[in-house]
Image: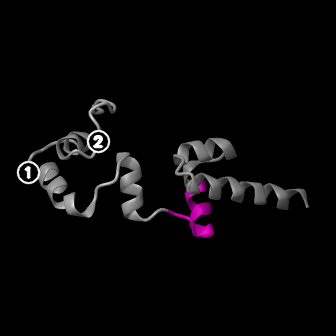
Amino acid sequence: MRTKSKCDARRKIILDGYRNNEPLKDIAAKIGCSLASVKVSASKLGCTRTHKEAAAFRRGFHIPEHKRDDYYQLMVAGNYRARECALILGLLGSGSKSPQI
C-alpha cells in the first residue's frame, strides 16, 4: 500500500510541474530521479509539451503568429540570436535580461 501512495505522489509532482511550466531538472530533483525517467513518466501520463510549447519554454518568450516570419528571417538570414531577434521585434522589454552568450 505504501508503494502505491509513493507512485501517486510522484505522478502528482510531475503533473503539477508540467502544469506550472517548471523546468524538467527541477521536477527530477523533487522526485530524485533522472530527466529521462521524468520524460517517460510524463509521456505515460499524457502531459508532455508540444514542440511549439517546448520551443517557447526554452526561449523564454512567445512569438505571435504575425511576427513569426520576421523572427525566422532574422534568425536565419540575419544570424541573430533568439533574444536579439526578440528585442528587435519588440517581443521583450528593454529592461529584460541581456542576451545569453
Q: Nearer the viewer, residue 86 or 22?
A: 86
Magenta stretch: includes residue 64 = no
Residue 27 screen position, x and y as percent: 60, 47
First in sequence: mark 1 vs mark 2 = 1
* Residue found at the far right of this picture: 1
Residue occupying the point 63% across, 41% down: 29
Residue type, numbered disc 1: Ala
Q: Nearer the viewer, residue 2 or 84?
A: 84
Instruction: Give the extent of the magenta segment.
Output: 37-48
Which residue carries the number 2 mark?
Answer: 92
Q: Is residue 67 left or right of residue 32?
A: left
The vertical placement of 65 against 26, above or below, is: below
Magenta stretch: includes residue 43 = yes
Residue occupying the point 64% across, 54% down: 16
Q: Is residue 88 left or right of residue 3?
A: left
**For the residue labelled by badge 2, is the local secondary structure a helix, a strand or a loop?**
loop
Q: Which mark is residue 77?
A: 1
The vertical placement of 8 against 95, above or below, is: below
Point out the image quarter for the C terminus: top left
Residue 37 screen position, x and y as percent: 60, 55
The quadrant in which residue 55 appears is bottom left
Residue occupying the point 55% across, 49% down: 35
